[in-house]
Image (cartoon, rainbow, N blue to C red):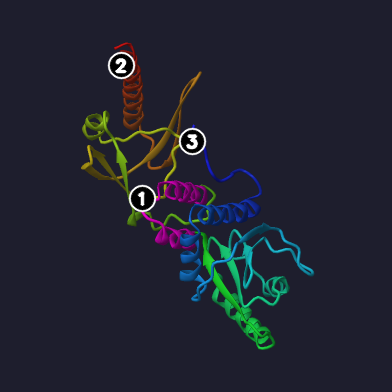
Amino acid sequence: MKIHYFQRYHEKENVATANTMLLLSRLYSYSSDKFFRFLKSEFFADSFEPELVFALQEKSVDRIPDATITQEGFKIVVETKLTDWFYSDQLMRHLKSFGDEKNKVMITLASEWMSEEKLVDFENQLKEYNATQTYPVIHINTTFEMMANAIREVIDDRDYEMQDVLEDYLNYCYKDGLIPVSDSWKYLRMQLAGTTIDFNIGNNIYYDKAERGFRAHDYLGLYKQKSVRAIGKICARITAIETESGIKYTPEFGELTDERKALIQKAMDDGFRSRIKNRLNIKKRGCC
C-alpha cells in the first residue's frame, strides 16, 4: 500500500489548505534556499532569510484566515477555496491580519482563477486600502496547479524526496478535483518495466498497483536498462480488484469491453507469475 504524505477524505477546503501548507513547509524543511527561491520567483524580489512560522486558522481582529506564513519583515495570508467562491468583503477583513510588515502578500488559492469581475472589484478596494498604508499589500491570485508548477521549477530532478512529495500532492489534487485534467495531453509518464516489458509491449497493456497515482497524462513510455523501449497513447485506464465474488472492474476512463476484461485477467496472471518468480529468486540467493 502506498503511504501518502497528504491526508484525504476529510472536509475538502480545510484539507486543501492544510495540504498546501504542508507542501510548502516540507519544501522549507528540505531546503530553505529552494523555498526562498520559490517565494522570490512568485511573490518577492528582495533578499530575505529569517525563520518562518507556518500556522493554520490564525485569529486576527474579526476574521480567521485559512493559513498564514510569517517571518520578521514579511507575512503571507492565504485564503483557500475549492472553486471561485471569493468575496471582497471577506478578503478585505483578512487585511486586518497584517501588521507593520514591510512585505505583505495575500494569496487567493483555488482550483480555478478568480473571475475577472471579482478580481477587478477586490483590486479596486485593495488599491484604496493601500493608499492608507505605509507598506502596501500585494494580492496574488493563483491555483493549486500553478503553485505546484512553481515549486517544480525550483527543485531539481535529483531532489528525489521533494519530487516524491510534490508528486503525491499533485495526485491528491487530481483525485479531489483541485486540478483540471484538460491539459493531460501535454504529459508523458515514464515507467520502469523490467521483467514485464515483453508482456507489456506484446499485449499493448501496462499494469501497476491500484494505489499508485500520478499526474494526469495521455501518453505512457516504458523503459528498461536506462533505455526507452516503447511509447503509446493511453486509450483506457481501468482498476481491477479481486473479490470473493470475482473481479471488480472500475473504469476511470475508456470503455470496459469483454476484450479488455480478458486482457486484464491476462495481466493479473502475469503479475502473479512475476511475484512467484521473484520470491523463488530471493530464496535461491538466500540459500546460496
Disc 3 packing (10 Å; few <14; some 14–19; many ≥20): few
The residue at which mark 2 appears reads as: 285
Query: Circle 1 sits in a helix, a strand or a loop, which is it?
Result: loop
Amino acid identity at mark 3: Lys
Amino acid identity at mark 2: Arg
Residue at the (33%, 20%) spot, across then down = 278
Answer above or below: position of 171 versus 130: above
- What label does residue 247 carry, if any? none
Residue 252: x percent and y percent? 44, 41
Residue 192: x percent and y percent? 30, 38
Classify the position of the C terminus by image quarter.
top left
Q: Using the numbered discs, state the Cα–Cα distance from disc 2 to disc 1 in whole angstroms.
A: 31 Å
**Magenta residues: mostly which secondary structure?**
helix
Left-right relation of 105 to 286: right
The residue at which mark 1 appears reads as: 158
Left-right relation of 31 to 25: left
Residue at the (66%, 85%) spot, across then down = 134
Answer above or below: position of 29 versus 7: below
Residue 185's image quarter?
Answer: bottom left
Task: Answer with mark 3 or mark 1, whichever residue precedes in sequence.
Answer: 3
The residue at which mark 3 appears reads as: 2
Q: Nearer the viewer, residue 174 or 107?
A: 107
Q: Which residues are magenta?
A: 145-174
Disc 1 packing (10 Å; few <14; some 14–19; many ≥20): few
Left-right relation of 29 to 53: left
Amino acid identity at mark 1: Arg
